[in-house]
Image (spheres, grey):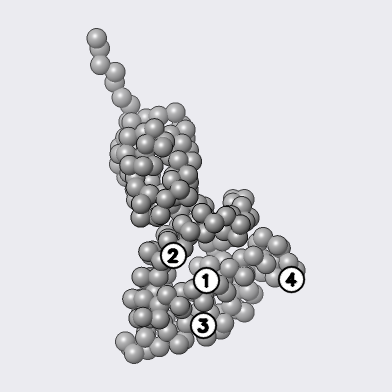
Amino acid sequence: MTAKKLNYEPSPCGKRGPKHPRGQVRADILAAAHKIFVRYHYQEATVRKIAAEAGVDPGLINYYFGTKQRLFREAMALPADPARVIHDILSQQSADLGRQLSKLALEAWEQAATAGTLSALFSALVTDEETQRIFRNYFATEIVPVIKEFAGRDGALIAQVVGAYGAGLILLRYVVKMEPIASIKREDLMEILQPVLRALVATGVGTTLRHRA
């Protein structure tokens, strides 16, 4: 019997893997990941569990997504690698911290709004206990440690205060679409947000950065 020859294609993660029907395996993995992340604690939602749910080899998850964090972001329609971007902004020790954070938030969530996923995601966060649980876990394990690196023991509180402020903005601008905040230009909104965000982080991250300077 002649062995079946596999065709290979480059992956988004820079690896090579077996060629499957276009987009189907990736979509199956995303659907399975969403179920597993809802069903289990973030740390308990292993790659093997997701692969078993999708009916694929665990290696294909690494092939298509690279990391568990990236898979989570895509499965839950999150913007790209917020922890890394926040770390980069804070590590610059910039006086323009408020503007950079507001730019990050607006650009990221506008991408999700354009893709049509933001309303559904926000609705799930408000109404679904399981979705709330996995976001709490993700926030605690991926975002808070980054803030704590710069703000010390108050990092969790500071991160939550800034997050609460951002959640209100997201709700009014992108979900409820309340005027005039829904239609104001992004640059104009950034000018309003900049001093507010700077004030929010001044007692924690800002103070720590000044001590390091």
In the rendered image of this protein, does residue 51 appear above or below residue 154?
Answer: above
Q: Secondary structure at mark 4?
A: loop
The residue to which callout 3 is attached is 200
The residue to which callout 1 is attached is 163
Which residue lies at the image location 44% right of the left edge and 64% below the top edge?
139
Dot 3 and dot 1 residues touching (CB under 8 Å): no
Density class for disc 1 (Cα within 10 Å; few <14, some 14-19, many ≥20) is few
Q: Earlier in the sequence, mark 3 or mark 4?
A: 4
Q: Secondary structure at mark 3?
A: helix
Which of the two discs, 2 and 4, sits closer to the camera?
Answer: 2
Which of the two discs, 3 and 2, sits closer to the camera?
Answer: 2
Label 3 to label 1: alpha-carbon separation: 11 Å
Residues 203 and 196: in front is 203
Q: Earlier in the sequence, mark 3 or mark 1?
A: 1
Identify which amino acid the numbered label 3 is placed on: Leu
In the rendered image of this protein, does residue 193 appear above or below residue 56?
Answer: below
Residue 55 in percent (x, y) is at: 39, 32
Label 1 to label 4: alpha-carbon separation: 22 Å
Identify which amino acid the numbered label 2 is placed on: Phe
In the rendered image of this protein, does residue 155 appear above or below residue 138?
Answer: below
Q: Is there any visible trace of residue 118 in the rendered image?
A: no
Dot 1 and dot 2 residues touching (CB under 8 Å): yes
The residue to which callout 2 is attached is 139
Identify which amino acid the numbered label 4 is placed on: Pro
Residue 5 in percent (x, y) is at: 29, 21
The residue to which callout 4 is attached is 180
Which residue lies at the image location 36% right of the left edge and 42% below the top edge?
49
